Amino acid sequence: PPPPPPSPPPPPPRECYTRHDGSDYRGRQNVTANGHVCQNWGAQSPHTHPYTPVSAWRRAGLGTHNFCRRPGGFPCAWCFAVDTSGRFAWDCCDIGPPRRGGGGGEGFSP
């Protein structure tokens, strides 16, 4: 008999946030919608920026991590993309729709 079909990929972790603009997103998504790895918010390379964890942006969930956040009134949760080609400085992240409960990011606060 033929081998069984491969298992489907696991669903992304469910992460809790409730505001439609994503401003309260505190999950662990660290790859942009276009597949770029996010730059650590504490790093100034490859992109220099004012959104540092020790600045006024800490309340927006910035920290010494590279998770998508929504500081600065951007239209989406986003991050600086680790892309040295110069085509992307920042990029939106696909964090899914707002929802309460779940798992993954629930209770996670960096």
Image (spheres, rainbow, N blue to C red):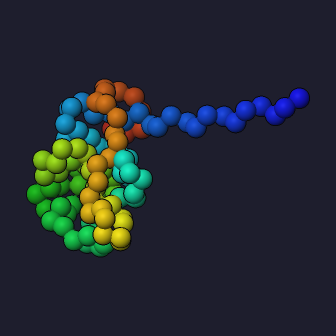
Out of 109 and 92, give the one closest to the viewer. 92
Drawn side of residue 71 relative to residue 89, left or right: left
Image position of 7 with respect to 39: above or below: above
Residue 93, image x and y in percent? 32, 47
Residue 50, image quadrant: bottom left
Residue under the point 29% across and 54% down: 91
Residue under the point 77% across and 31% down: 4
Out of 1 and 87, give the one closest to the viewer. 87
Drawn side of residue 106 relative to residue 49, left or right: right
Query: Can you name the residue that lies furthest to the right here?
Result: 1
Residue under the point 35% across and 58% down: 38
Query: Can you name the residue that lies furthest to the top here?
Result: 100
Image position of 10 with respect to 88: above or below: above
Residue under the point 58% across and 37% down: 9
Image position of 25 with respect to 45: above or below: above
Residue 69, image x and y in percent? 25, 49
Looking at the figure, which quarter contains the N terminus?
Answer: top right
Out of 107 and 19, give the one closest to the viewer. 19
Residue 72 shows in the view: yes
Residue 63 shows in the view: no
Residue 48, image x and y in percent? 22, 71
Residue 82, image x and y in percent? 36, 65
Q: How many marks?
A: 0
